[in-house]
Amino acid sequence: MQITEQTHMLIADDHPLFRAAMRAALTDVVSGELFEAEDFSAAQQCLRENPDIELVFLDLSMPGNHGLTGLTQIRNEFPNTLVVIVSAEEELAVIKKAVALGSSGYIPKSTSLDDMVTAVKTILNGDNWLPAHISLDAETQTAEESDFLERLGQLTPHQFNVLKMLADGRLNKQIAYDLGISESTVKQHVSAVLKKLGVINRTQAGVLFKQTLQL
């Protein structure tokens, strides 16, 4: 993707003060439009209504977002949109998972304003940005988790939504009602999800989903 100074961005965070700090950092870097969302549903709606948004700053713990689920949903539904995680969570295992799931950067909320500006400039130049003290070389994931993260990227947006509902214990008929599709279509999605994830049943798929994405 060609990122320019006219890049439109979305700040998705439920804390007004942090959104203001991010806006201050971004205003000096780009001249494109800056959108804001205070919950995950609003962030999704904003992205759907503004397909020219190229970069999203996503809070891991905002309402409607459970761990890394939101990152995966955005990457699945909007594959050409870059996502940068902003979070108070600084655990290495979480940062590594975010990068594995396609995050273009990880900005802890303890980051200084100057470093935020550096992070944004780095990402706009096409590189990933992580805090200087973070090393991705350390082993923090099991082989099963790494394989699951890779397989998640093969799911379509519809399949990911079905998987998320499976993890919440929803029945096929409930999923069909919520998504406005037939039960037979849900069964087809479930079958495809299990095959792509390499799991034997919906219970295993749901357990892995929660263990891997819902921090």
Image (tube, rainbow, N blue to C red):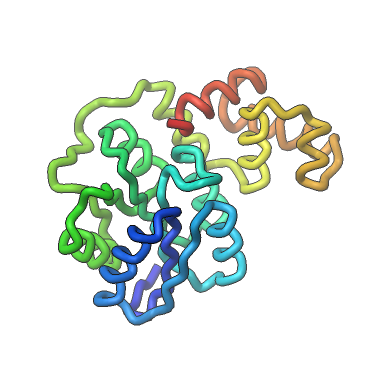
Residue drawn 55% across the image and 70% down it: 51
Q: Quarter of the image containing the N terminus?
A: bottom left
Which of the 4 image quarters holds residue 16? bottom left
In percent of width and height, residue 155 lies at 59, 41
Image height of 66 relative to 74, above or below: above
Which of the 4 image quarters holds residue 18? bottom left
Image height of 97 relative to 105, above or below: above
Of the pair 135 and 37, the residue shown nearer to us = 37
Of the pair 133 and 109, the residue shown nearer to us = 109
Q: Quarter of the image containing the C terminus?
A: top left
76 with respect to 143 (left or right): right
Residue drawn 45% across the image and 58% down it: 12
In percent of width and height, residue 157 lies at 62, 48
Which of the 4 image quarters holds residue 179? top right
17 with respect to 206 (left or right): left
81 with respect to 45 (left or right): left
Image height of 63 relative to 119, above or below: above
Q: So how many labels did they put on this image?
A: 0
Residue drawn 48% across the image and 69% down it: 53
Residue drawn 64% across the image and 42% down it: 161
45 with respect to 54 (left or right): right
Tell which residue pokes out farthest to the left in this image. 133
In percent of width and height, residue 152 lies at 52, 37
In percent of width and height, residue 192 lies at 68, 34
